Image (cartoon, helix red, strand yellow):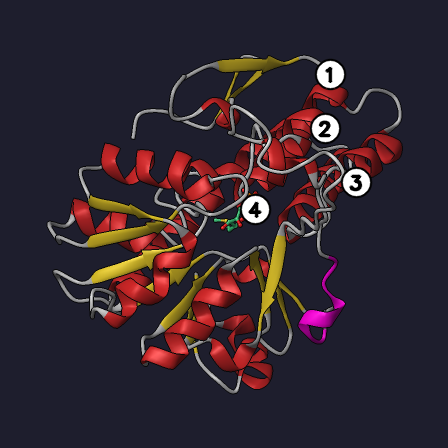
């Protein structure tokens, strides 16, 4: 794909506005910390690792004369993905110790490319040429730097000559699967079929799916994972049909301060999104109440393996996630 999601050069920061995809390719320049907050909040830049990379550049360039306050403000834009606070804290620490914040942000960006490549290699080792793969949300290059996490094995596999068949959940309500994943996989020449979220059971039952690959926003110490809303439903189905369910994420997504998924703060978005986003007319009456959590938690018992840049980690996750700490 030749559309980078985040562009930095000569002190200027641009993002590809993902809310306009796939119909319009438009870059917008960030000029202040409020622009950056807004870009994260309205999902113009999104996907856990990409939010981290972007937040690193944002705090480096626009912290003004109150680093702590700017950092706190930026972190408050979205609560679930661990990468946001991790990157902001890392760049802030560099600045406080007299180092260049922008060099630290560039380092985070470069490290992400390497991490995604490793995750993709490990993930690819679990697939066979010709496999059918179900994906949810968008965990590809738009959500990271290069290759992606959940989509990484498909993209790297294509580079290496594999032919996979991707079944893409549209991912209600914000359609990251339909708008972003299909666009991204098709631009890599990967065989891609879009399905509504409620069709996952059917394609599994028909034998079209050999593995489910998803990204994660935060992973608890016991292996429960916060993923895009709807992911846990796909995990339940995969278990029912005996299909491996893989979560792919950088090792830094594990938050050992969260013992279980119950400790993960789940972002709740404006319920109007359910009724109005991408519809010509609202799909329900104004008074109809909506519940719009952006993520849900997949229980560790539904996960076949967590694939990180430090290797493929299997149950018991509470023991094996900690063991992988030094597997670099
Ligand atoms: O709300 P979004 O679009 O930022 O959610 C993105 C996801 O859920 C991704 O799958 C997740 O961040 C993993 S990132 C590779």
Spatial separation of the CA atoms under disc 3 and disc 4: 14 Å
Secondary structure of the residue carrying tag 3 is loop
Q: Answer above or below: position of 12 versus 105.
A: above
Q: Which residue is mark 4?
A: 48
| Mark 4 Cβ and ligand 1 under 8 Å apart | yes
- Say if disc 2 is inside 8 Å of ligand 1: no
The earlier-in-sequence mark between 2 and 3 is: 2
**Residue 201 lies in what quarter of the image?**
bottom left
Q: Percent x, y for residue 316?
A: 52, 87
Number of the front mark, 2 or 1: 2
Give percent across and percent down for residue 31: 68, 12
Q: Range of the magenta residues?
A: 259-265
Q: Residue at x 39, y 71 (%)?
A: 245
Between 267 and 325, which is closer to the camera in this rendering? 267
Question: Going from the N terminus, do you reach mark 1 or mark 3 first?
Answer: 1
Left or right of 217? Residue 270 is right
Mark 4 vs mark 1: which is more N-terminal?
Answer: 1
Identify residue for label 2. Answer: 37
Q: Which mark is residue 32?
A: 1
**Quarter of image, res 119:** bottom left
Instruction: Please state if 22 lies on the left or on the right of 290 as rendered.
Output: left
Q: Secondary structure at mark 1?
A: loop
**Pointer 2 with pointer 1, Cβ within 8 A:** no
Q: Is residue 6 above or below residue 245?
A: above
Label 2 close to label 3 by CB (< 8 Å): yes
Mark linked to residue 76: 3
* Residue at the (42%, 54%) spot, across then down: 197
**Closer to the camera in the image, 240 or 254:** 240
Whether residue 262 appears in magenta in the rendering, the answer is yes
Foreground residue among 97 and 158: 158
Residue at (16% x, 66% y) in the render = 128
Residue 54 left/right relative to 36: left
């Amino acid at each position: 794909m030749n559309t980078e999601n985040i562009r930095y050069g000569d002190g200027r920061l641009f993002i590809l506005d993902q809310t306009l995809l796939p119909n319009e390719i438009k870059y917008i320049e960030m000029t202040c910390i409020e622009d950056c907050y807004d870009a994260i909040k309205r999902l113009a830049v999104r996907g856990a690792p990409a939010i981290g990379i972007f937040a690193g550049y944002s705090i480096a360039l626009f912290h003004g004369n109150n680093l702590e306050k700017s950092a706190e403000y930026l972190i408050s834009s979205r609560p679930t993905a661990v990468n946001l606070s991790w990157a902001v804290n890392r760049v802030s620490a560099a600045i406080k110790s007299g180092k260049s914040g922008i060099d630290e942000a560039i380092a985070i960006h470069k490290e992400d490319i390497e991490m995604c490549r490793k995750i993709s290699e490990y993930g690819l080792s679990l697939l066979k040429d010709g496999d059918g793969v179900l994906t949810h949300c968008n965990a590809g290059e738009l959500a990271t730097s290069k290759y992606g996490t959940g989509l990484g094995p498909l993209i790297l596999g294509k580079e290496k000559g594999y032919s996979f068949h991707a079944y893409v959940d549209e991912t209600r309500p914000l359609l990251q699967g339909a708008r972003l994943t299909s666009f991204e996989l098709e631009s890599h020449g990967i065989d891609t079929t879009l399905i509504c979220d409620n069709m996952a059971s059917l394609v599994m039952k028909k034998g079209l799916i050999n593995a489910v690959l998803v990204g994660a926003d935060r992973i608890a110490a016991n292996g429960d994972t916060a993923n895009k809303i709807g992911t846990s439903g796909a995990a339940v189905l995969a278990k029912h049909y005996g299909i491996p369910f893989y979560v792919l994420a950088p090792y830094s997504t594990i938050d050992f301060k969260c013992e279980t998924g119950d400790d993960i703060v789940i972002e709740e978005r404006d319920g109007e999104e359910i009724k109005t986003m991408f519809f010509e007319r609202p799909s329900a009456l104004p008074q109809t109440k909506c519940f719009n959590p952006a993520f849900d938690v997949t229980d560790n018992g539904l996960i076949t393996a967590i694939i990180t840049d430090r290797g493929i980690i299997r149950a018991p996750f509470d023991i094996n996630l900690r063991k992988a700490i030094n597997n670099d």
